[in-house]
Amino acid sequence: MPRERGQNVVATNRKARHDYSIEDTYEAGLVLTGTEVKSLRAGRASLVDGYAFIDGGEAWLDAVHIPEYNQGTWNNHPPRRKRKLLLHKEQILKIHNKTKEGGYTLVPLSLYFSDGRAKVELAVAKGKREYDKRQALRERQDKREADRAMSSRRHLGE
């Protein structure tokens, strides 16, 4: 059987980009059981309430929902368990120092398979205030309207 190539996105946390301003991103491997991998390959996962943290020099991912595998037997996994993240020690130290500063948190952005291995994209992020969210929405809407106006002018000139 040929090896898997490329990226296959399983789940994304679109709300994270709205709720947080992202400082740094990291790619981390996941320690999973067999039924978790099969469930992910079926394209079932949710990152909505997920978060990551550093404990005892190790990185952990918590509250990410990977539903039980349908054909799993008595050795099926619990859907919301703590999962260990695979990162280099230097990255863990850098993330730990940043999150210890205050105001920063570690949020999963996406869960995907890269060359057949399960990976999670983590972001060191700072929470946005309510008015920042509204301002970002307004800027996005203004940009969209300006692009529409430009494209309609381009079409009229032709």
Image (tube, rainbow, N blue to C red):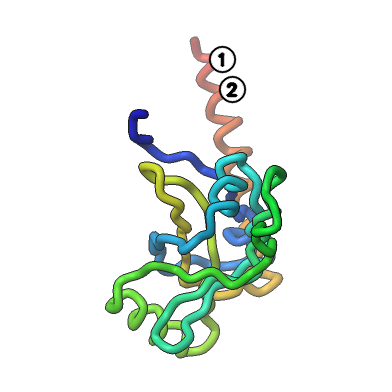
- Give the left or right position of residue 117, taking residue 83 as reference: left
Question: What amino acid is found at the position of numbered circle 1 in the picture?
Answer: Leu
Cα gap from disc 2 to disc 1, whole angstroms: 6 Å
Q: Quadrant of the N terminus?
A: top left
**Residue in view at x 39 percent, y 67 percent:** 86
Q: Is residue 4 above or below residue 154?
A: below
Front residue of this view, candidates 143 and 81:
81
**Residue in view at x 62 percent, y 53 percent:** 14
Residue at mark 1: 156
Percent position of residue 113, x then y: 45, 46
**Residue in view at x 52 percent, y 53 percent:** 111
Residue at mark 2: 152
Q: Is residue 106 above or below residue 28?
A: below
Front residue of this view, candidates 81 and 55:
81
**Residue in view at x 52 percent, y 79 percent:** 53
Percent position of residue 11, x then y: 59, 48
* CB under 8 Å between discs 2 and 1: yes
Q: Residues within 10 Å of mark 2 (few under 14, many from 20)?
A: few
Question: What amino acid is found at the position of numbered circle 2 in the picture?
Answer: Ser
Percent position of residue 13, x then y: 61, 55
Look at the numbered disc 2 and give the secondary structure of its residue.
Answer: helix
Look at the numbered disc 1 and give the secondary structure of its residue.
Answer: helix
Front residue of this view, candidates 70 and 134:
70
Instruction: Determine the image quadrant of residue 74.
Output: bottom right
Return the residue found at the far front: 74
